[in-house]
Amino acid sequence: MKKTYLILENNETIYYLDEGNKEKEVLVLIHGNQSSGIHHMPLIERLKNDYHLIVPDLRGFGDSSYNVAVNSLEDFSTDVISLLDDLDIHEYSVLGWSTGGGVALKMAALRPDEVKNVILVESCSYRGYPIFKKDENGAPLMGQYYLSKEEMALDPIQVAPLKLFFDTQNKVVLKSIWDQAIYTVNKPSPEDHDMYMNETMKQRNIIDVLWCLTTFNMSQLTNGVTLGDGSIRKIKAPVLSIWGRNDLVVLEYMIDETCEALVNCKKVIFENSGHSPYIDQPDQLEQEIRRFLKK
């Protein structure tokens, strides 16, 4: 698979994979944090004969540029929409994994007449992903939020060590984190794992992304940090939300509250999957996507 690129009007260079059958319907695949478009490879291989797949590296991930820092997940969404506009693609379905789920939801709210279907895979909530303050033992103080990016960046458990691992390019430790938190059921082959980690190490925006997740809020209420914009009500597309029973990153209540806020949302639970059904249950993932898009 070879990436190509476009320079957007905002002067960001977005690299992306353009795979599959260009005569078929378009499916846009949005990756999550600590990853890139390459992490969708198991799904690309399974779907490329029947879909036209556009798979970007978001700004600051993979090979895409990071000229201007993102301030919200919406910045990622508008980048992808601009990419699709430049490709003259104005009707598509979008799949978002983890953080990418928030990006996908915002795309569906910004372009409700273009986004025909939304697939959420282990997605963050439409009310964001909280990072709580810690006590002297490092345990989270539930309901006590960081109120600035600078304060959050000093978090001694979830944030500061992670930034250090990226700054020092500590691939061994980051691989261990993936093995313990993401690949909780199955693991990719050593060759694929190394390829994915090489892509992970390219990320240049870890603090900004974590703050974007904290402040993301499409509800009409506060999430403890920011007041929501109510944009979840603008989504017209049907939504499929997939969650793995063994997910240690995204909790089930996050999936449930998002589905409850949507007009048309179907929740599917994978009993033998963690945060990466791409590796844990790829065949079932393919089947659910095909079933949903053929409805």
Image (tube, grey):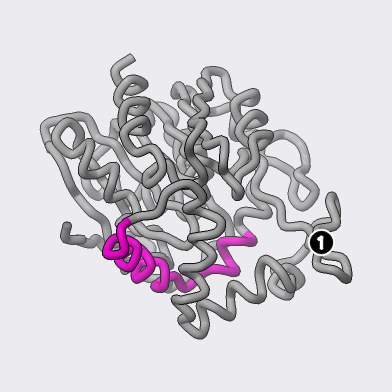
Residue 263 in the image: state x and y as whole percent.
57, 18
175 relative position to 46: left or right: right
Front position in the image: 171 or 83 = 171
42 relative position to 259: left or right: left
65 relative position to 183: left or right: left
Residue visible at 53% across and 44% down? 102
Looking at numbered disc 1 in the image, what kind of residue is underneath it? Ala
Residue 237 in the image: state x and y as whole percent.
44, 24
Q: Is residue 55 magenta?
A: no
State which quarter of the image contains the C terminus: top left
State which quarter of the image contains the N terminus: bottom left
Q: Is residue 209 magenta?
A: yes
Residue visible at 51% across and 70% down? 205
Chief SS of the magenta region? helix
Vertical order, 160 against 189 (above or below): below
Residue 282 in the image: state x and y as whole percent.
34, 38
**What's the magenta region?**
189-211
Front position in the image: 247 or 168 = 247
Front position in the image: 263 or 167 = 167
Front position in the image: 128 or 219 = 128
Residue 194 in the image: state x and y as whole percent.
33, 68
Residue visible at 46% across and 26% down? 240
